[in-house]
Image (cartoon, helix red, strand yellow):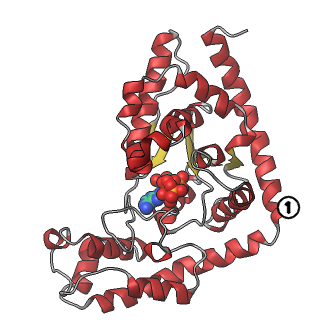
Amino acid sequence: MDKNKLVFSGVQPTGNLHLGNYLGALKNFVALQDQTKCIYCVVDLHAITVFQDPKDLKNNILETTAGFLATGLDNKKSIIFNQSAVSGHAELAWIFNCVARVGWLNRMTQFKEKAGKEKEKASVGLYIYPNLMAADILLYKATHVPVGADQKQHLELCRDIAQKFNNDFKKNIFPIPEPLIQKNISRVMSLRDGTKKMSKSDESDYSRIDLKDTADDIIKKIKKAKSDTSSIPDNLKDLEKKPEALNLINIYSDLSEMSLEQVLNEVRGKDYSYLKNKLSEVLIEVICPVGKKIKNLLEDKSYLEKVLREGTEKARNLAVHNIKEVRNAVGFI
Ligand code: AQP
């Protein structure tokens, strides 16, 4: 256990957790909790940057918590809580709104992707989302953040904010957090479009594998997944020109714990139906037990609420001390 390292990461309660969340985040979270102290947060303040029906939000907070526990996070080892329950997140985010520069936020590609052509109609919260993410991390003085490829730019911004705050106030309050880059797959793409990431908010259910999918759902979705009419290429260079095929092979490689080369040796020259059958088998083996656990946990909502309450207490104890230090540095009474 590395005592000098503190890991922070979060997941938005915006709907069903999916394979991208699992391979890009949760699987890694579980591995980290045995190596170092970790804080895992259900980031409900981030979720409301896009309107959420209050009833759905409540359920989704509990469901994300169930997803954490079902994939193997242990609330005795890691701190598990929901962001809005610790007011320090919002307080520090406001201070960071005054530290970060408009030009820095203008460069954030996720805002451009999520706001799309309706930029003027997007919430201000969606625009300043990266400042809140910086507050989430730095409120606990976290030193390491497991990030998928899609979050790298936001972590860079968090580092800039930490540095500017320390410089502006001439105090070395915040560590400059380091990314923990995934060894394996860093971005799981949509099953319908290999250039778009798998996402909870994609309208098409067929674009993703949800952790609660049944074996039948998985078989159907993989059968329908976009692939290619010709057979599977025999080298990585050709495969890279076919984003949907590459995505299926990447997922198979990660789930079966084989290297891309080993997978290519197995599937080269074969029909995509061969790969799809193999992929369905391994998905059913890995994902269905997680889905069953999520469903079981959701039957006892008061237990999930208790997990969050206890985690909140621990998170608050850490945050209170750090917020005091920040307020002092800024000059608040
Ligand atoms: N497709 C993905 N591939 C790899 N990692 C992914 N993550 C999400 N999608 C993929 C990682 O999961 C963690 C939690 O993500 P999040 O739910 O907080 O936010 P998100 O990245 O915006 O996920 P979605 O599914 O796209 O949600 P919506 O549709 O609500 O915006 C993060 O570590 C993320 O990298």
Percent position (x, y) of residue 257? 39, 73
Looking at the image, residue 241 lies above or below residue 178: below
Q: Which residue is mark 1?
A: 302
For this orientation, the residue located farthest to the right is 302
The amino acid pointed to by label 1 is Ser
**One can see residue 307 in this view:** yes
User: Could you say which quadrant of the image residue 73 lies in?
Assistant: bottom right
On screen, 122 above or below 57?
Answer: above
For image coordinates 75% across by 59% down, the residue present is: 55
x%, y% of residue 108? Answer: 38, 38
**Depth check, front residue: 266 or 163:** 163
Taking 299 as reference, is 60 left or right?
left
Could you tell me if residue 279 is visible in this image? Answer: no
The local crowd at label 1, few if under 14, some if 14 to 19, many if 20 or more residues have their Cα within 10 Å, is few
Foreground: 241 or 125?
125
| Residue 250 x/y as whole percent | 33, 71
Name the foreground residue: 327 vs 109: 109
Q: Residue 184, relative to residue 280: is it above or below?
A: above
